[in-house]
Image: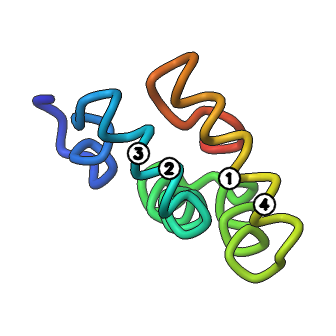
Amino acid sequence: MANNRMTASYEALPKIAKIFLQIFFGWLIGGVYRIIRFLETKNIVTLVVGIVGLVTGIGNFILWVCDLVTEILNDKITILAD
């Protein structure tokens, strides 16, 4: 990818690698990814969802499932990661 976004390195990984990362480390990747996306887009909802996902157990589980499904279907994290 030729863009300068910090999340571009994660998005440039092969689909199968991102799926494996989501299965094993999705509980951490989802929150951190959204916080980094906030730094790029300045969308406050993305920051709040990232923090809630890292801090709360149920929020973390919900984000993990959503991120795994969107990685499989769209090859990127899309839900509340604007």
Give coordinates of residue 71: x percent, y percent. 52, 30
What type is the residue that disc 4 sits on?
Phe
Instruction: Identify which residue is drawn at 44% across, 38% down.
Output: 19
Going from the N terminus, do you reach mark 2 or mark 1 first? 2
Q: Nearer the viewer, mark 3 or mark 1?
A: 3
Residue that protrudes farthest toward the left in the picture: 2
Disc 1 residue crowd, few under 14, some 14–19, many 20+, Cα 10 Å: many
Give coordinates of residue 38: x percent, y percent. 54, 59
Q: As drawn, is 53 to the left or to the right of 29?
A: right
Kindly indicate whether the residue at mark 1 contacts the one at mark 2 (C-beta within 8 angstroms). yes
What type is the residue that disc 1 sits on?
Trp
Residue wearing tag 3 = 20
**Toward the viewer: 65 or 31?**
65
What type is the residue that disc 3 sits on?
Phe
Residue wearing tag 1 = 64
What type is the residue that disc 2 sits on?
Gln
Callout 3 secondary element: helix
Going from the N terminus, do you reach mark 2 or mark 4 first? 2
Kindly indicate whether the residue at mark 1 contacts the one at mark 4 (C-beta within 8 angstroms). yes
Give coordinates of residue 22: x percent, y percent. 50, 49
Going from the N terminus, do you reach mark 4 or mark 3 first? 3
Residue wearing tag 4 = 61
Callout 1 secondary element: helix
Disc 3 residue crowd, few under 14, some 14–19, many 20+, Cα 10 Å: few
Residue that protrudes farthest toward the right in the picture: 58
What number of labels is visible?
4
The image quadrant where one finds the N terminus is: top left
Gap between marks 4 and 1, in whole Å? Answer: 5 Å
Gap between marks 2 and 4, in whole Å? Answer: 12 Å
Look at the picture and state if 79 lies above or below 47.
above
